[in-house]
Image (cartoon, helix red, strand yellow):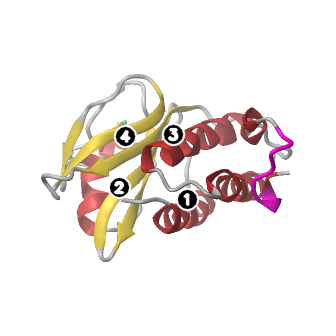
Amino acid sequence: MADSGHNDNIYHAEYSNYSTSNKEETLEQLNDSYRGLVAGQDNLVCNLANASSLLWYAYKNLGINVNWAGFYITKKDNDQKLILGPFQGKVACQEIQFGSGVCGTAALNQQTEVVSDVSKFPGHIPCDGETKSEIVVPIILNNKTVALIDIDCLDYDAFGDVDRRYLEELASLIVETCKF
Ligand code: SME
């Protein structure tokens, strides 16, 4: 379905359904669905909003207790500050300084952060006190962090190398397909 590009004959909501419970296949399907959904569309809010839904349902499909999945975007008037972008989950903090918390650290270092226990991460920003583990993937354009992917989980040690690989691929797809 979603791997052959945008298809007007399917309902958009079907992109949020996953046909496998294997993690690699699910995340591959997520990235294929993203490619299909954004064909002919480069609006940042629109594409990140749909990407949030794809992420949310991908992890739900895997039985992983994700409680937040979404994006922070570098502010236009301050390139050292992130502002809350499209997401799924509970209300979250609006602004994060580069260098602060997991998100700010990934944004500053331009490196993915995989945190198995957020209570052990210096400066972790507890938007939700229930969160136990987190992955943050920077989205980099022309050597600048322009946004990031952030996913939180209610269980320890939820994310690893497979998540990192596919989410870094998603970050590259977002740079290629969205107007920042
Ligand atoms: N925990 C993050 C803040 C963002 S929320 O998880 C949505 C951090 O420490 O950067």
CB under 8 Å between discs 4 and 2: yes
The reply to whether the residue tagged 1 has its Cβ within 8 angstroms of ligand 1 is no
Amino acid type at mark 2: Ala
Between circles 2 and 1, the one closer to the viewer is 2
Q: CA distance from mark 3 to mark 1?
A: 16 Å
Q: Is residue 70 left or right of residue 29?
A: left
Residue carrying label 2: 147
Secondary structure beneath disc 4? strand
Q: Amino acid at mark 1?
A: Leu
**Residue shown at 26% from the left, 37% from the top:** 125
Q: Is 161 placed above or below 10 here? A: below
Asked if the residue under mark 3 is in contact with the one under mark 4, i.e. CB atoms within 8 Å, the reply is no
| Crowding near the residue tagged with mark 1, few <14, some 14–19, many ≥20 C-alpha atoms within 10 Å | many
The C terminus: image quadrant: bottom left
Is the stretch drawn in magenta largely helix, strand or loop?
loop
Q: Quadrant of ligand 1?
A: top left
Q: Which residue is at the front of the view, 19 or 73?
A: 73
Q: Which residue position holds label 1? A: 167
| Tag 3 residue | 49
